[in-house]
Amino acid sequence: MRDFNAVSQQVDALYQQVMREENKGRYSEELWHYYPKLTHTHGRAQETRYVYDLCRLAQFNPEGKRVLDAGCGFGLQLIVLHFMGAREGVGFDLSNNRLNTFQRIIEDFQLGNSLRAYLKKLEEVDFEPASFDMILSNEAISHYLDVEMFFERAACWLRRGGVLIIADGNNGANPKLAQHTREVWRRFEQGPKGTIGVHNIKQTYQELRAEIIRQAYPQLDARTVQQLAERTSLMMRETILQAVAHYVETGEMPDGRFDGSQCPVHPYSGEVIERLFHPMELAHDLSRYGFRARAYSYFGGAGGNPVIRMANRVLQWLTPLSLRWAPSFRVVAYKE
């Protein structure tokens, strides 16, 4: 694997230019909010070490390899992998702001020979079978509408012996984290609006469903619209309208109330805000798709503190016992 210090200097030099204040007009301002660490050298080294640690955990050297980031966002991990020597890095994401920023960075720093990015959902992309050496899902699997589809496609897209790396903070084995995530679900579904954690809720999913129903059926009174909006949780626009049409025809209300057990769905886009996963179950599920997978607790260490890094190694070795307290997890899966 290429020398960390050399790669860190390259990443530092690039993002020192990207994160200039005057670039907030060219790149999405969300970049500064999402990656505040990229505004200083220590933070840029931390983000680089984060990718190195993922590769070391998976025993994967990206030099000369073809890698895919499924949910690449601003493309930071792919840029680090590029400087680590990846032959080609491909990413896709459904966020227009984030993808546009990544594509502009590729253009501005002439990275187009080795980096490509597509504004597409998981359901919309496809690649040649056995065309990647590594697939990364970094803080992304929680937002896939169809996780099983991702597993199927990852198994197809990876070469034999290739590795799938999943890193995510929605550790369902941690009771405190699970409770917080379920409260995020409730707030997005029912309100109140406002800020919770990193999320800012401007309109609840119930309100969005009511909007869809009112536009299609203006003759319905406000109370009926509200009842229908409450009873069409987990549905998208087309399914909502089918349920309402059935009600108008038969008088039978749909029975899809939000009960807090499942992550709600954005009625227009189908996005899910934050899923919960038990890492051991996730690793077990991957075996059905031809992977040999293992889950790991993650307690930090990308900042470089040697005590934290040592503690993380010990606690990873103690997985699954340590998962109950882990703020995050990793799953490393090899295609057999």
Image (cartoon, helix red, strand yellow):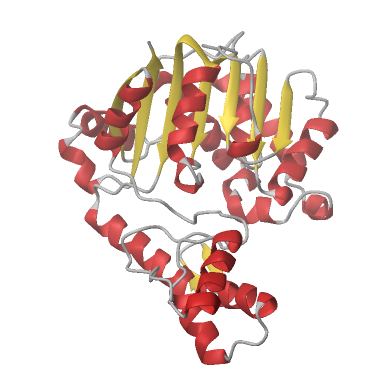
When the figure is inspected, residue 88 is found, relative to residue 224, above or below; the finding is above
Quadrant in the picture for residue 161: top left
When the figure is inspected, residue 24 is found, relative to residue 222, above or below; the finding is above
Note whether residue 112 is visible: yes
What residue is drawn where x is 36% and y is 67%? 183
**Image-based side of 311 in relation to 302, left or right:** left
Q: 244 or 261: which is nearer to us?
A: 244
How far across and down, in percent of the image, does residue 285 sit? 31, 31
Q: 280 or 130: which is nearer to us?
A: 130
How far across and down, in percent of the image, does residue 22 sit? 83, 53
When the figure is inspected, residue 266 is found, relative to residue 34, above or below; the finding is below
What residue is drawn where x is 72% and y is 49%? 96
Note whether residue 203 is visible: no
How far across and down, in percent of the image, does residue 46 sit? 51, 36
Q: 286 or 138: which is nearer to us?
A: 286
What residue is drawn where x is 26% and y is 36%? 281
Name of the residue lying farthest toward the front: 250
How far across and down, in percent of the image, does residue 107 sit? 84, 32
Q: Quadrant of the C terminus?
A: top left
Quadrant in the picture for residue 30: bottom right
Q: Report the number of discs.
A: 0
